[in-house]
Image (cartoon, rainbow, N blue to C red):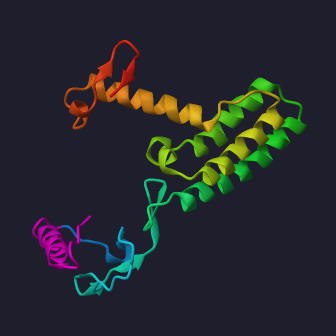
Amino acid sequence: MGLISDNDERAYLEEIKHLENWCQENNLLLNVSKTKELIVDCSKKQEWHYQPVRISGTTVERVDSFRYLGVHISQDLSWSRHTNSLAKKARQRLYHLRRLRDFRLTSKVLRNFYTCTIESILTGNITVWFGNSTKQDRQALQRVVRSAERITHTELPDLQTIYYKRCQTKARRIVKDPTHPNNRLFSLLSRLNWFF
């Protein structure tokens, strides 16, 4: 990750060179074919002409988005590509849920299958992306949940509730761990059990 200010790439390119030298000194080899460059430009113009990054004489591929730890990160920092990927994968799993329903399994078994195979897809890393996703993206994911409710004949938690609970859990862990780098950013409002 690097920062380019005032269209001056020198610090960014020097940092890449520093990383390349450090890897050589420590007998590490960078796999340039797996290395990607993603430029996030928050300016209104978005007209940039940055020189290509080279590592060991090989040009690093510049991409519009990439998948990191299961999350699609886009250069415009939108989550549409990620949520579309999740919705597609979850809809594929709905087929299996319907087949299980056709075998007349109980609602409890169907709900467990949903939780393990569909909800886990929809809520993976939810605290990272859900809060900044668009209403349209959230609705697309919620439609999958509603379809699963019709199949299982049970009420399932909506994604907003799951997101809220996971954020609360994460915040509590940070507050309880004084060694966490973000611990000082949280303080518990005891009267309401909220974080500020």
Report which quarter residue 187 is drawn in: top left
Q: Is residue 148 left or right of residue 162?
A: right
Residue 23, above or below 121: below
User: How far across and down, in percent of the image, does residue 119 sit?
Assistant: 63, 39
Q: Which residues are magenta?
A: 1-27
- Viewport quadrant of the N terminus: bottom left
Residue 77, above or below 117: below
Q: How many marks?
A: 0
User: How far across and down, in percent of the image, does residue 22 sit?
Assistant: 12, 67
Q: Is residue 175 left or right of residue 178?
A: right
- Which is nearer the eye, 82 or 133? 133
- Which is nearer the eye, 14 or 47? 47
Residue ID at (43%, 53%): 69
- Viewport quadrant of the C terminus: top left
User: How far across and down, in percent of the image, does residue 129 sit?
Assistant: 48, 49
Residue ID at (37%, 82%): 47
User: How far across and down, in percent of the image, does residue 52 sit?
Assistant: 30, 85
Q: Is residue 62 magenta?
A: no
Q: Is residue 151 left or right of residue 122?
A: right
Residue ID at (65%, 34%): 158
Q: Is residue 189 left or right of residue 79?
A: left
- Which is nearer the eye, 100 or 46? 46
Residue 82, above or below 158: below
Q: Is residue 8 magenta?
A: yes
